[in-house]
Image (cartoon, rainbow, N blue to C red):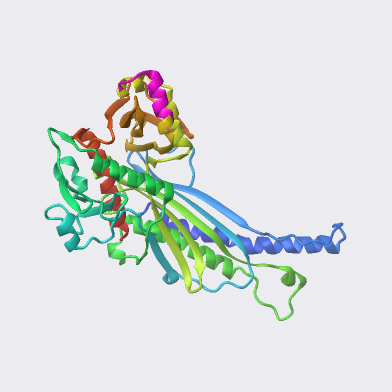
Amino acid sequence: MTSSLFGLEELPKKAAAVAAQVPGTARELVSVSIDRLIRGLDTWPETMVLTVAKVGWRFFIAKSGTRVVFLFWKKNLPERVLLDATLDMSIVPSDARATPLSMAQVAFRIQIPPFVRQNPSPALLAQIGPSGATPSDTIVLEVGPGERDLLAIRRPERGPSGATITYTVFGRTEQVRPVGGLWRPKPFLALLDALRDWVAVGGGDVVAMRPPAPAERSDAWEILLHVADSYVQASEAVRLRQPPRSAEPTLVDELGVHYDMGPFASTIMLRLKPDGEIAQTEGDDPFQLRMAVTMQRERRGVSADVELKPPDFLASGAIRDGFLDELEGALDELADELRTTPAQARLFLRNARETAVVFRVKRQRKWDTDIVVLAQRLDGDPVVAMLRGQFKVKNGAVKMRAGRLKGLFVGPTHLNDPAIPRDVVRHFLRLAAEIKNWLGVLS
């Protein structure tokens, strides 16, 4: 664990300080409305009641030069953001007084991506995995319409030269190897389809998690615990600021409302090293972890539900469409890479919009490198196109750098001859390694 999370440990105290103001403010509103009624200043008898208090924060851990700083908001971020998170909490009226709450009552649950085979057994790996595969170094992905279609990758973090891959279809397993420096597209397109379905539909098995011992916690776990503690301390601050029961309640007591924590949600984007610590330099070989956390009271405590989200992977939405609009604005480049006419390129792009996928493979200060995958009929044949270009996204607007579009793979979807170059395989293995790392730092 990083020795200090650069001030993030103060987040629960700040959340509690804000939440503590709500009961008193609500009581003041009731008191003012009663005072106005008594003094005859209100034409209609009414009581003002605070129905909900909402607080939204966005906070960062960022690196500027050699300094690492924690900040709650900044219009122009430093050069490298290590953590980008939001926290939204609401305080709402409650029919009953809240009971005391502690971190010991928080139950963590994680939603595993639906295509990840959890805890593959040694027997399964011996049957469908690469030679020497173990549960600790191999990820098994369900990538077909049936549960028997499996992609097993041992040591995906080692890239095309160090990873070993097997692909099982209809119960038949074969090793995936390059031929003449090119790889068969089907296993990797199957992985892409699984990722796209996950982004579009979500879902997956929910598994209980227990926080590791303090000496074994990764930065990801520490941050998750700070977010959960923000809920607990804010809840306790609200509970302890409720007016005490009175033997002779006043009119303000009778008309007052009790409060408790309502909906609470947080999104967390992290740059991590494979061991789960925050990556402060590019030399740390960082991967990104994105989590969505929701918390709510349950009968015996509090649930903290964690859903993993694929960072830098777009399968829908306005930003994804912005990438496609930029491609349509560069039809000559697109047509050259598709080896067709601009008119056919436009038709191909428009028909491929619904299932198009964009994922970032390299983050840079000015221009990021992204891959756009399009699948549709082109000149009468079903074709998949993987296009790499340089893009930047600012305030929701996408801009493509002219002259940098390159077709990494353009070919028929029904053929499975070796056709994908090493660079494309490296990107897919990076995606698989990130999925493996996501589960590793939290499990």
> Which residue does the image show at 21% across and 47% down from the upper left?
156
> Which residue does the image show at 39% across and 36% down from the upper left?
356
- Counting the numbered discs, the total is 0
Asked whether, in this view, residue 340 is left or right of residue 296, the answer is: left
| Image quadrant in which the C terminus is located | bottom left
Q: Main secondary structure of the magenta part?
A: helix
Q: Is residue 162 above or below residue 406?
A: below
Q: Is residue 127 visible?
A: yes
**Observer-nearest residue: 337 or 2?**
337
| Image quadrant in which the N terminus is located | bottom left
Asked whether, in this view, residue 126 is left or right of residue 391, the answer is: left
> Which residue does the image show at 59% across and 60% down from the upper left?
91
Task: Pinpoint residue 162: horizontal percent, then vertical percent.
Answer: 14, 44
Answer whether residue 41 is magenta in the image.
no
Task: Pinpoint residue 71: horizontal percent, then vertical percent.
Answer: 45, 46
Q: Is residue 393 above or below residue 289?
A: above
**Observer-nearest residue: 168 or 389?**
168
**Observer-nearest residue: 324 or 292?**
324
Q: Is residue 280 visible?
A: no
Task: Pinpoint residue 82: horizontal percent, then vertical percent.
Answer: 36, 45
Furthest toward the front, the residue is 380
Query: In the rendered image, which quarter is residue 36 located in?
Result: bottom right
Task: Pinpoint residue 238: horizontal percent, then vertical percent.
Answer: 58, 66
Q: Which residues are magenta?
A: 339-350
> Which residue does the image show at 45% across and 36% down from the upper left?
319
Query: In the rendered image, which quarter is residue 387 located in?
Result: top left
